[in-house]
Image: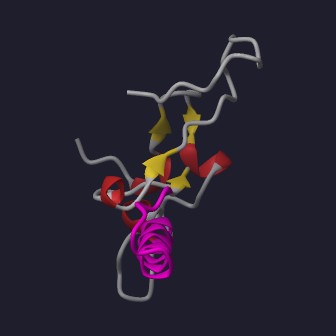
Amino acid sequence: MNIPVNVLTYTIGNGRLSLHALATNATHADGQAELDVHNLWGLMEEKATHLALQEIIPDKRPFVMSRSTFPSSGRWTGHWVSRHFTQRPPALPHVASC
């Protein structure tokens, strides 16, 4: 099936992703679709932060958390999963998602 990129369905909210988050049909100057590289900026920030912390404190392992992930982000950062829709009481500690 060949669905146009600007009508992708956002499965969690069952609405169009382009209405609530980003223009899914946007393209960069080099022709890459925004949908394919959206979180790449976050990955570059995560990597730069990780490497800078290693340089500043070489004998310690950096601890970096991010909500923006991209393939290979796990090497540089942990993934923060916010609690927007949880039913747990706020006093309970956050639990890493799987």
Residue 22: give x, y in percent of width and height. Answer: 59, 58
Q: Which residues are magenta?
A: 41-63
Residue 59: give x, y in percent of width and height. Answer: 39, 69
Looking at the image, which residue sits at the far left? 1
47, 60: nearer the viewer: 60
35, 83: nearer the viewer: 83
76, 36: nearer the viewer: 76
Please, is residue 24 above or below residue 81 in the view?
A: below
Q: Is 1 left, or right, of 23 in this rendering?
A: left
Residue 34: give x, y in percent of width and height. Answer: 45, 67
Report the quarter where the C terminus lies. Answer: top left
Please, is residue 6 above or below residue 52 in the view?
A: above
Q: Is 82 left, or right, of 77 in this rendering?
A: right
- Which residue is drawn at the image coordinates 41% and 71% (left, top)? 47
Please, is residue 56 above or below residue 73 in the view?
A: below
Looking at the image, which residue sits at the far right? 90
